[in-house]
Structure formats: structure tokens, C-alpha cells
Amino acid sequence: MKKIVVTSLLVLAVGVALALTGVAQNAPTAPTPVRSSVAVVDVNKVMTEWKYVSARKTELENQFKPKFEAIKARVEELQKQSQVLKTMKRGTAEYEQMENTLIRKEQDIKTDNGLLSKQYDEQAAKIFQDAYKYIKQHAAFYAKQIGATCVIQVNSADEFQAYNPQMAAQELTVREVVARQVIWYDSAINVTDQILTRLNSGAQQSNSARTTTTR
């Protein structure tokens, strides 16, 4: 009788062990913890206050300023000649000749101004492209330092009256409000100033990335 009881207990123990093993095998594994820290950067503020961008914009403006002034002088001269044309008698050969000359000059000025403006815009865009690349690199560096897994671009210059009491509500259109990707964020996750400080200090900034604006 004792032998039968012991055997039954052993069988029961084996059955329970097998059952527990099956439960353990079928139970879902615990999910691996995922970091979800987020940081925000005001790219517009960085572009405005970063000395590197300011220096390159000033360099570009100084390069193109004489060229735009030359076109402005041509426009002023054209306006003077147009006033002279008004004093001439319509229908005369002299009038038609001068009128045709002024028309050609006006077309030439528009063409030259358009080409110059395009060159300026292209080189200004290159400055911001280079700057954005730097901002992205430093944002990634700083995010890793604080354990953030995502950096989101924000623009703090056009927040609601709660953040800027001096701004009238009507200055913000519905379309502008709805288009915002970030509705609210804790100021503690705004790392704009930290990144701006690093950029202005020249940390890890390669001079080779600076391309000349001269053509």
C-alpha cells in the first residue's frame, strides 16, 4: 500500500512539473524595455543666433551688395531717361528710337536681376543646408548624452499667448495652428540652448564643411 502511494505521488509530481513546463513555454516573454525620451530643438533660433551662420550670411551679402547696387544704379538711370522720353514728341523717329532703347534696357535689367537673385538664393540655401547638417550632428550627439531617442524640431517664436502674451490671437491663422506637429512640450526637454552653446563654441566643427560663397 505504501509503495502504491509513493508511486502515485511521483507520478503526480512529474505531471505537475510537465504542466508547469508547458505553461512556461507558452507564456509570453516580457517585452524588452525601450527608451522613449524625446528632446526638442528650435532650429529657427539656432539659425538666427549661431555665429557661424551669421558670419557666412554677412560674407554672402557683402559679396553681392556691389552687384545689386550696380543694378539699382541702372534702374535709376533708366527712370531718368524715361522722364526725358516724356518730354519728347510722340511719333517722331527720335521718340521711337529712344523708347525702343529703354524697353531693351528694362528687359536686360530684369534678366540680370533675375539671374543675380537666383545666384544669391542658391548660395544662401547652401549656407542653411550646411548649417542644418551641423545642427543635426550636434543634436544627435547631445541626444545620446542625455539618453534621448528622438529629437523633434519646434519653433518657439510663434507660440500662443500663454507663451507670448504680447502676441495677438488673430496673428495665428487656423491653418498655421493645425499644421504644427508639436502641440505642447515640457520646456525641460528643450535642448536648443545647449546645442547652440556647443555650436558657437566650435565644438567638433570641421572647417572643411565650409564652402566658399565666391563664384
Image: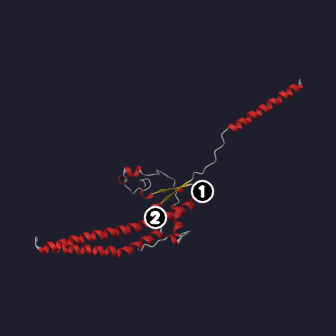
Image side of residue 125 versus residue 80, left or right = right
- Disc assigned to residue 147: 1
Helix, strand or loop under label 2: helix
Residue at 71% in and 38% down: 24
Image side of residue 195 versus residue 62, left or right = right
Residue at 26% in and 74% down: 74
For mark 2, what is the residue? 129
Quadrant of the image for the C terminus? bottom left
Occupied quadrant, residue 86: bottom left
Residue at 13% in and 73% down: 95
Of the two numbered discs 2 and 1 on the same chain, state the one appearing first in sequence: 2
Occupied quadrant, residue 105: bottom left
Helix, strand or loop under label 1: loop
Q: Is residue 40 above or below residue 117?
A: above
Alpha carbon of mark 2 to alpha carbon of mark 1: how far? Answer: 27 Å
What colouring method underlies this structural image?
secondary structure
- State the image coordinates of residue 23 (x, y, percent, origin top left): 70, 35
- State the image coordinates of residue 181 (x, y, percent, origin top left): 46, 51
- State the image coordinates of residue 106 (x, y, percent, origin top left): 24, 70
Quadrant of the image for the N terminus? top right
